[in-house]
Image: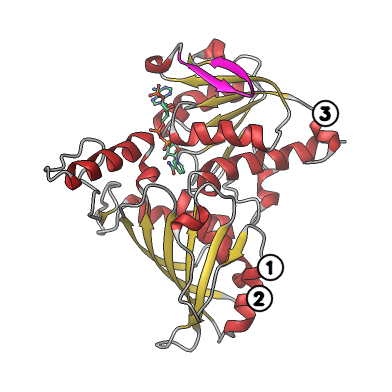
């Protein structure tokens, strides 16, 4: 941020402030010294009155309604698709810009879908709402963009290893609790996720479509195409929930129109914004969720030639999806807008 935009404090509302992403938004607003005149914490009536400490103050959570959105300049929404569909248009009508973490508007042609390191200019085309992409897609796009800028990208095959936190704060609690149950010799019974994740994994729990893919897998296809402006990109995904508390991992195969030398890819990925290389073939040390938990950078490594295809590369990445996959990306978008209005 520049000193000029630091002088433009805004009234900011976090819609979904008590959730996993909402709590991270709160932490990041403080950490990045986002210029704030007033911060409103909004959630469902269940959380109304809850006091949340922030910057030495106690902020009280309010139930979202029209009055709570009045006078707000920026809404950071992370309360799910139906809540965003209900309240984002009202917030915009009342003069706010909404940066939305849900899937409600991501594929709307009128709404930019933005990863600041990949397509920052799109943010400036907004008509009030800007969508934050799906978490796995944000992490993936950071690795695809610097390579696709050098050689035409033809096809991506990705398998994800998604942590409990991707399903929200209650899913994280459930994984911890059910892991204790199993260690104590009990039978884990899940309530938040469809199956117990404790010492287990299962295919992603988003709704299955007629073509056999789940919604999360199709989000990766359509959102990657939109962010990268590659309408014809072929992408197939298999999304899996794994018993990791926080941070997602992805095994990625990238096919180009021509061979892509590994050393060139490694140099590009090492220098790309938002990425960090963790790669030591001598000690078999590559990115792990624990390397990125609570951190901004998405870690990549094990970049190698695909032995089955001379035009393809393999790589592995890990990223904290509550942070770069959601809250950090949203705040980076807000910072982009700030830079735009700064004199
Ligand atoms: P979460 O931990 O379950 O939190 C949900 C939040 O929404 C809570 O603050 C909840 O408030 C609020 N909420 C629920 N119903 C509401 C209503 N009717 N009116 C107002 N507020 C309501 O979920 P999350 O993981 O933070 O995810 C939030 C959104 O971000 C979802 O759209 C999700 O898909 C998206 N997202 C999540 C991740 C991730 O890694 N977790 C990544 C990218 C995007 P109460 O406490 O009052 O119930």
**Distance from the alpha carbon under mark 2 to that under mark 3:** 38 Å
Residue 273 picture location, percent across and down: 67, 60
The kind of secondary structure element at disc 3 is loop
Residue receiving disc 3:
7
* Start-end of magenta stretch: 50-59
Q: Which mark is residue 101?
A: none
As drawn, is 335 to the left or to the right of 81? right
Res 331 → quadrant: top right
**Left or right for 14, reference 197:** right
Q: Residue 178: percent from the left, percent from the top?
A: 22, 41
- Quarter assignment of residue 250: bottom left
Dot placed on the residue nearer the N-terminal end, 2 or 3: 3
Mark 1 sits on what residue?
271
- In the picture, the quarter occupied by the N terminus is top right
Q: Which of 282 and 217 is in front in this view?
A: 282
Residue 111 in sight here? no
Whether label 1 touches label 2, CB < 8 Å: yes
Residue at figure coordinates x 55%, y 21% from the top left:
53
**Residue located beneath label 2 in the image:** 267
Residue displayed at 59% across by 43% down = 328
């Amino acid at each position: 941020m520049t000193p000029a935009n630091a002088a433009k404090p805004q009234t900011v509302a976090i819609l979904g402030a008590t959730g996993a992403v909402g709590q991270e938004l709160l932490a990041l607003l403080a950490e990045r010294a986002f210029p704030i005149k007033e911060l409103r914490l909004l959630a469902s009536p269940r959380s109304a009155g809850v006091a949340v400490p922030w910057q030495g103050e106690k902020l009280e959570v309010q139930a979202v309604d029209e009055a709570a959105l009045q006078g707000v300049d920026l809404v950071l929404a992370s309360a799910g698709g139906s809540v965003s569909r209900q309240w984002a248009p009202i917030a915009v009508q009342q003069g706010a810009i909404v940066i939305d973490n849900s899937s409600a508007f991501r594929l709307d042609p009128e709404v930019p879908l933005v990863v600041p390191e990949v397509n920052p200019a799109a943010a400036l085309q907004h008509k009030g709402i800007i969508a934050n992409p799906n978490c796995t897609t944000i992490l993936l796009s950071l690795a695809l963009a610097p390579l696709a800028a050098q050689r035409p990208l033809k096809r991506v095959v990705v398998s994800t290893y998604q942590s409990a936190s991707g399903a929200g704060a209650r899913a994280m609690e459930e994984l911890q609790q059910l892991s204790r149950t199993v260690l104590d010799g009990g039978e884990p019974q899940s309530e938040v996720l469809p199956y117990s994740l404790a010492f287990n994994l299962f295919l992603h729990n988003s709704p299955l479509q007629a073509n056999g893919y789940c919604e999360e897998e199709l989000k990766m296809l359509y959102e990657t195409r939109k962010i990268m402006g590659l309408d014809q990109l072929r992408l197939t995904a298999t999304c899996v929930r794994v018993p990791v508390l926080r941070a997602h991992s992805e095994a990625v195969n990238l096919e180009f129109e021509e061979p892509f030398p590994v050393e060139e890819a490694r140099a590009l990925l090492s220098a790309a914004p938002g990425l960090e290389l963790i790669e030591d073939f001598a000690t078999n040390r590559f990115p792990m969720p624990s390397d990125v938990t609570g951190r901004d950078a998405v870690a990549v490594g094990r970049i190698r030639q695909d032995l089955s295809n001379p035009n393809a590369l393999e790589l592995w990445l890990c990223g904290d999806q509550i942070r770069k996959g959601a809250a950090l990306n949203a705040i980076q978008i807000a910072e982009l807008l700030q830079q735009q209005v700064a004199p």
